[in-house]
Image: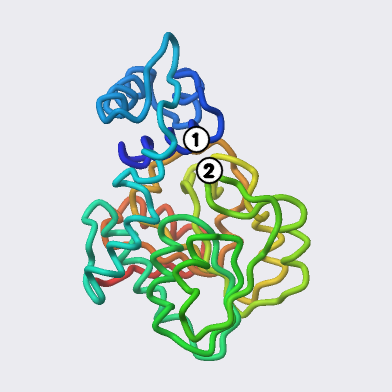
Amino acid sequence: MLAKERQNFILQHLYDKKTIKSSELASLCDVSYETIRRDLGMLQNKGIIKRVHGGAIILNKTLINTHPDNLSEKIYNFQVNSRDHFLDTADINKQIVAKFATNFVSPGDAILIDTGDTMTYFAYWLSKFSNLTIITPSLPVIQVLQNSNNKVISLGGELSHSGNVFVGNITKHSLEYFNVDKAFLSCTGLNLKTGYISDFDEYGIPRDLIRKHSENMYLLVNNEKLFVNALVNNFEISSIDHIIIDSGIDVSSMESLQQYNIDIIVAEN
């Protein structure tokens, strides 16, 4: 996980919990205690949090919502300032993968869109399409698509404020009403040693449930996620039909992925 991603993760946890221990953050992010201390120091210098003994507390929720790394603001700037170009260089691999993935969407498709930054960028490019049926638990995806010429169906449930996503049993049951042509998924990391997709929590829609209701599953990842070992291993890589990844993937990682006998697609800018 990159420094910006860790710091956003820290802010979202503080938004919900008000306070958090450094040791807990180090475990969740799979980094050293010293790395977390540096992250907290940077956030404190911005006036968003205050470091306390063994952790940090939130100072101002409003600053979290207007933090320049916040995805909703990035998407807004992306839409206003760049119709066909990549805006945020820190997210360029996510944007490349997201835009390239639209090549696998056809008019009339019913698709499921997962949550996360890459999925929201993907939704932005899909907003130029029409005649799609799009199902999602993600509020940012819904917001991006609200003025498009597509049918958008929200998988309701309990709102997770940290992720701007609907979660829980109601969300899972809602998905059971639908079957989709294609599901586009994100993840926190790929554990190439164990062969599992991993995430930081268990609150998302179970991948095996999505598998049951999808003809094809596409996993959209940037190459940095190949080196993230998150908390929860929740789905076998071999159960995915296609992986779309940016050209930054190295030869060794490509060879490791190929052993799972799935379709690996390298996104071209």
Position of 171 compared to 61: left or right?
A: right
Q: Quadrant of the N terminus?
A: top left
Front-lying residue, 98 or 218:
98
Asked if one can make out residue 217 in the rendered structure from this viewpoint, the answer is no
- Say how many tags the image has: 2
Mark 2 residue crowding within 10 angstroms, few (<14) / some (14–19) / many (20+): some
Say if 157 sits above or below 102 in the image: above
Q: Residue at x 27, y 72 (%)?
A: 268
Q: Are marks 2 and 1 in contact (CB under 8 Å)?
A: yes
Q: Residue at x 21, y 55 (%)?
A: 89
Q: Disc 2 marks which residue?
A: 162
SS at circle 1: helix
User: What amino acid type is highlighted by mark number 1?
Assistant: Tyr
Residue 62: x and y, percent?
41, 40
In the picture, the disc for residue 15 is 1
Position of 110 compared to 140: left or right?
A: right
Residue 179: x and y, percent?
70, 76
Front-lying residue, 143 or 2:
143
